[in-house]
Image (cartoon, helix red, strand yellow):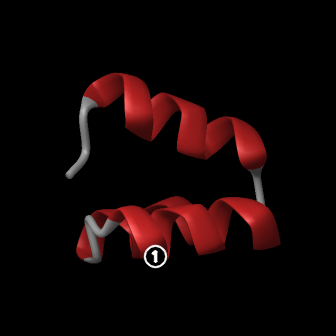
Amino acid sequence: MSHFFAMRFPKKRVVLKISQRSDGEMIKLFEDEGFE
């Protein structure tokens, strides 16, 4: 559910941290989507 956390905290830093801790592909999707 790391992706959900990223959604709640659309911060690049948070998303990056979550990506490193969990799925790296998810962060790529977020970056593509433009989550800022």
Label 1 residue SS: helix
**Which amino acid, mark 1?**
Val
Look at the picture and state if 21 lies above or below 34: below
Position of residue 18 relative to residue 23, above or below, is below
Q: How many marks?
A: 1
Image position, residue 6 (x, y; %):
41, 67
Residue 1 in view (yes/no): no
- Residue under pointer 1: 14
How far from the left and from the top, in percent, is residue 18?
A: 62, 71
Q: Quadrant of the N terminus?
A: bottom right
Residue visible at 48% across and 64% down in the picture: 15
Give residue 25's quadrant in the image: top right
Q: Residues within 10 Å of mark 1 (few under 14, many from 20)?
A: some
Report the side of 26 relative to 12 (left or right): right
Image-quadrant location for residue 2: bottom right
- Quarter of the figure with residue 7: bottom left
Side of 3 relative to 18 (left or right): left
At x 62%, y 73%, the residue is 17
Residue 33 locus on image (x, y percent): 30, 27
Residue 15, can we see it? yes
Relative vertical location of residue 6 with respect to residue 29 in this rendering, above or below: below
Instruction: Report the residue at 77% width, 64% height from top.
Output: 20
| 22 displayed left or right of 35 | right
- Residue reaching furthest top? 32
Please indicate whether residue 23 sits to the left or right of residue 6 in the image.
right
Q: Residue at x 67, y 59 (%)?
A: 19
